[in-house]
Image (tube, rainbow, N blue to C red):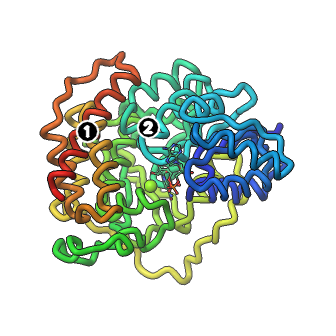
Amino acid sequence: MTQRIAVLGATGSIGDSTLAILAEHLQDYEVYALSGHQRLDKLLKLCQQFKPKRVAVPTEAVDDFAKRLKQAGLTAEVVGGTQGLIDVATDSQVDTVVAAIVGAAGLPSTLAAARAGKRILLANKEALVMAGQVMIKAVKTHHATLLPIDSEHNAIFQCLPATIQQDNTQIHDDSHGVRKLWLTASGGPFLQQSFAQMQQAGVAEAVKHPNWSMGQKISVDSATMMNKGLELIEACHLFDLPESKINVVIHPQSIIHSMVEYSDGSFLAQLGSPDMKTPIAHALSYPQRIASGSQPLDLYTLSGLEFIKPDLQKFACLRLARQAMQAGTQATIILNAANEIAVEAFLQGKVRLTDIASINEQALSEVKASKLSADADIDDILAIDSLARHYTESLVRQML
Ligand code: NAD
Ligand code: MG
């Protein structure tokens, strides 16, 4: 049967990879809905190519985009804003939601998809960082399916026993013999450079990732290793493990995408070219396999694979992520919000790359939020998010 897909964040890097796979498998998948935020010319081209039934754009762009679709002879319904994204994510015709919006903006639609019992292909790690418990509870209560497409989490998923995969990836305890998870990190563009060199880095150097081609925000997060910090928090929620059971190791070649260590001494790893099409194709077709279009690894030309312990002074964001995870959800919300503001300030040339960690650290210690209760909901989460954003914005203003 054809799987009907909504790609939220269709104009981004994950959107590109997802649609490149879908274009090769249109007999099995229907592109039912698309969303885009900034690059609406690109969204229009995607509409011409995939002819979705529904399209979500910012509220202020609805009328104009509907006009442009009509001029192009297309009949898709255009919806707007956060509610539009939620409508698309919960549409009864949609089987699978690809959650590929960047940042906190992706949370409401991802959570709505969980509450509507959808199959969710999760790229938007910020949704779990901000609302891990709420998301996982919604997935369980509404019998949704959460399939990670962040490459590390997808690799771990592939290395776990089928019983855990089918129990929404929750490991809970060591009854399956899982001793630790190992998240691999490339170390980003500054791995071989000193802190002083990192301090001087401009935007172009910071977003130039050695192995992966990605959106701007996640590229900066990779340069500071905040990305690995967010992924650590994402993994705690996804796999129901404390942060102490998750190790991070720098593996500059990005060939091993992560590992599961078992109590008998086995380490299971997933390998592949650094291309997001592999984890996306895995999740799209799970439990089957489809061609992804990524280049197979050429093992004969691979030289050494290296593994390095991260330097937590140079990459302080990784230390902050562990600290926040230990402190509780209110702290991971603050860290995520502060980081979004700090990254944006760096991209606008207002602060240095190395200021991002200090801004995040200051927000973590200065923003006061009480511990969230187990039944906290999205409004409680967004209130802390907004508090942290305001604090961080004023901190950035003081630094100018
Ligand atoms: P990107 O910047 O290339 O694309 C982001 C998408 O989100 C675009 O379609 C954009 O229009 C949309 N968007 C941005 N702001 C929005 C808003 N306020 N409201 C609605 N839509 C908005 O980002 P990306 O690299 O594709 O990353 C997307 C998500 O996937 C991020 O959460 C990232 O951490 C995660 N991820 C990306 C990669 C990767 O290789 N690119 C890998 C793993 C995880
Ligand atoms: Mg990743």
Residue 334 relative to residue 276: left or right: left
Q: Which residue is mark 1?
A: 390
Quickly name the residue at label 2: 127
Q: Is residue 89 above or below residue 50?
A: above
Q: Position of residue 211 (x, y in %)?
A: 46, 71
- Categorize mark 2 by other alpha carbons within 10 Å: few (<14), some (14-19), many (20+): many
Q: Which class describes the residues within 10 Å of circle 1: few (<14), some (14-19), or many (20+)?
A: some
Give the secondary structure at mark 1.
helix
* Pointer 2 residue Cβ closer than 8 Å to ligand 1: no
- For label 2, the SS is helix
Q: Amino acid at mark 1?
A: His
Q: List x then y, in percent, for residue 32.
A: 75, 40
Say whether residue 207 is left or right of residue 25: left
Q: Earlier in the sequence, mark 2 or mark 1?
A: 2
Spot occupied by residue 152 in the image (x, y as percentages of width and height): 45, 53
Residue at 25%, 37% (x, y): give it: 388
**Disc number at residue 124?**
none
Tell me if residue 77 can be seen. yes
The correct choice, above or below, for 353 with respect to 197 in the image is: above
Where the C terminus falls, by quadrant? bottom left
